[in-house]
Amino acid sequence: MKSGAAGARVRNKATIKVSVEVMSWLKEDFEHEGWDRLVFDQEITGNSSIMDLLQQLAKKYPRFNQKAFIDSKHNLLDYSAVVFNGTFLSSLQNLDTELKEGDNIKLTPGFYGG
Amino acid sequence: MYGSTGKVLRVDMTQGKLWDEALDEATLQRYLGGTGLGTKYLMEEVDPKTDWSDPKNIFFLGSGILGGSRIPGSGTISITTKGAMTSGATSSQANGNFGAYLKWCGYDAIIVQGASTTWKYLYLHEGGAELRDASKLLGKGSWETEDAIKAELGYKERAMSVFGIGPAGENMVRFAGVFGDRGHAAAHNGLGAVMGSKKLKAFAAQRAPNKLQFADSEKLGELAKKTTEGAKAFGGGGVFNWGTSRVLPAGEAAGYLPVKNYQTNVFPEKDLFDGQRVRSLFKSQNYPCYGCASHHYELMTVTEGPYKDFFGKEPEYEQWAAWGPQIGQKDPGAAVVLSNECDNLGMDTNEAGWLVGWVMECYEKGALKKEDLGGLEMTWGNVEATRALLKKIANREGYGDTLAEGVKRAAEKMGGEAVNWAIFTGKGNTPRGHDHRGRWVEMLDTVVSDTSTLQTQMLVVDKDLWKMPNPMDVFNPEQVVQAEANSTGSMTVSDCLVQCWFCSFNDTKTQTESINAATGWNLSLEEVMNIGRRAVAMMRIYNLKCGLTPDKEKPSSRYCSYTVDGPNVDKPIVPHWEKMMDQYYKMMGWDRKTGMPLPETLKELDIEDLAK
């Protein structure tokens, strides 16, 4: 996976589409109350990183923003883990990975417990 | 004394005698109760060479200094004894009401010694305690035992708390647990087998009037609210609102869901087990523990499928995992049945799930045949065969007698390639219901643990306080060791206080404030943290004397095997293991060869005399 500081990239104005699945109780923070799967396509500017995508989602969904980014006591990875194209991302550094058309992102509850 | 009854109840099963013993304030300040206090008594009274089934073994069941207060999760109990699985010290907790009722009956803890020749149960009430005849309870499951004792003594559902053993405990199945308050379990390391060895069927405590006194009740009330707010917030509030049941599909996505005995990480039916779906589909009702406002614990009736109308408790995540993906079973209704029947027979679901998965793999590969198993066809997902096998194990019938010894012993008895299919640690215990190949810190913890189950983990609200990497790369060997070593003691503080983890989330600062408000003491944060670390070190010292030496701190080959699919294919722990252990021992201040805490570690924890 290619990684690097998102701010250092040259922005590609073209948009790409990625697939996002929000799992378990995180769905409530995306204003989805049912138990059925929450899967949607999300458009984002080319060259964006996974973290850029999360920030974009945070602007749209205030509860996700509150829990993932505003509460300084809890780290993002406590609240939400990220599976990228079927691979579990274990560090914040991995969230700098650049997105491509058709990428698949799953957001799962944070990584804690027995 | 504020916060405490100042007494423990002594029970001699051999002589049928009961007496009160004073519990002084200095001892409680040093241990808080629960796991720490139980370990103190175990070290002082049970020779490490004593067999777990010897009448000389003691069985400690205790509350803690917050037990029966307004602090959420303070109805929990902690049990300490020399366990049947590892033949070493153990500590296992069960939520519910018993911890509060115990203290309201006038005791901080019960210590059982000796062994009876006839079956008894212990009845605690406002006026004292007595041993009663349990012969009519023999063969009854944990729910039936609760019903029968309440009926005999004339108590309504919540007017009494009962914890006891099922047939598995009576037959000293090595992984028999202690169950009560409708399915809560202190399941690990054969606590139920120890009760069976003493012919003690159950503990029953009346909900007596609460006469406990606390130093600052107003402050304690404020801290109770703060604790509840903390539980609501932690991890986005998922456990508070949904219990543990909603993580199963996410567990598959992240690669920590055990599927078919670690042979794959793919479980296409995962969404059928989504906790919200199941709660919507089946009939469920909240059944909270003492002092808890969360929706963690529910009772459930299956409303469709072949097990329609079955009533029991909602399985915890680990029960869904064991009786769904681990055995290749796709019907949530059947998982409700298997979870409750395993509980009712009185067996640890974790061990039973690994055991049945191993049997199914042996059956698939021809190492076990139908005729070996009393005619059972142990194909993946065969619910009826699993129900029958669980009964055979609980009753030690046929091959069930071998399986009743647990995964490690059964596999080693069979020998050959089948040992490589079994999931266990060198100490004789098995992991919680996860695929720890995707959770390195839990694998390390499970293997080095002296409780026989998780001893510490990432369930810590204040990572900075415990010097955990934050954020943490869960596949970075150095960070994993740092997290494990530095947070050692965090969960044990909760287990000494005997407060439910899902209420406290091991928030040591709020716990310290609560201790001081309850007792009028002025313990510092560091002193409370050291109480947890001290209890861990004490168990280690005791277990080393029991023969649980560093060479046994290894995962079985399947437990640490390479994953073949799923999200963690390229992340084997094996190449890092020895270096991680070296680093872990160094950070813990333990001797790498002997396992013993180094003199400076002992001095820091004020237990220099115990290592002799």
Image (cartoon, coloured by chain):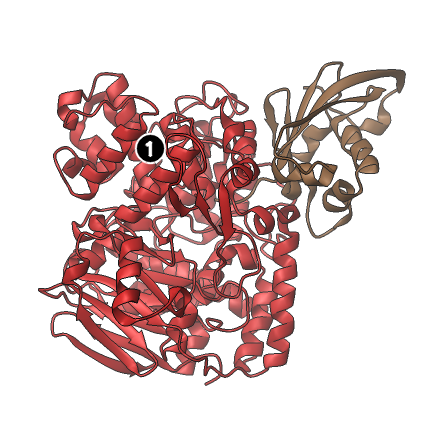
- In the picture, which quadrant includes the C terminus of chain B? bottom left
In the image, B12 versus B143, the foreground residue is: B143
Reading the image, the residue beneath label 1 is B423
Which residue occupies the foreground of this view, A35 or A92?
Answer: A35
Chain (brown) = A
Quadrant holding the N terminus of chain B = bottom left
| Chain coloured red | B
Number of other residues with Cα within 10 Å of mark 1, as a class: few under 14, some 14 to 19, many 20 or more: many
Q: Is residue A23 visible?
A: yes
Element at label 1: loop
- Indicate the position of residue B604 as horizontal and vertical percent values: 46, 66
Residue B384 sits above or below residue B583 on the image = above
Circle 1 chain: B
Tell me: residue B55, above or below residue B15: above
Horizontal and vertical percent position of residue B43: 28, 66
Please name the amino acid that badge 1 sits on: Ile
Q: Quadrant of residue A15?
A: top right
Residue under the image location 43 percent in, 70 percent down: B100
Is B509 left, or right, of B450 in this rendering?
A: right
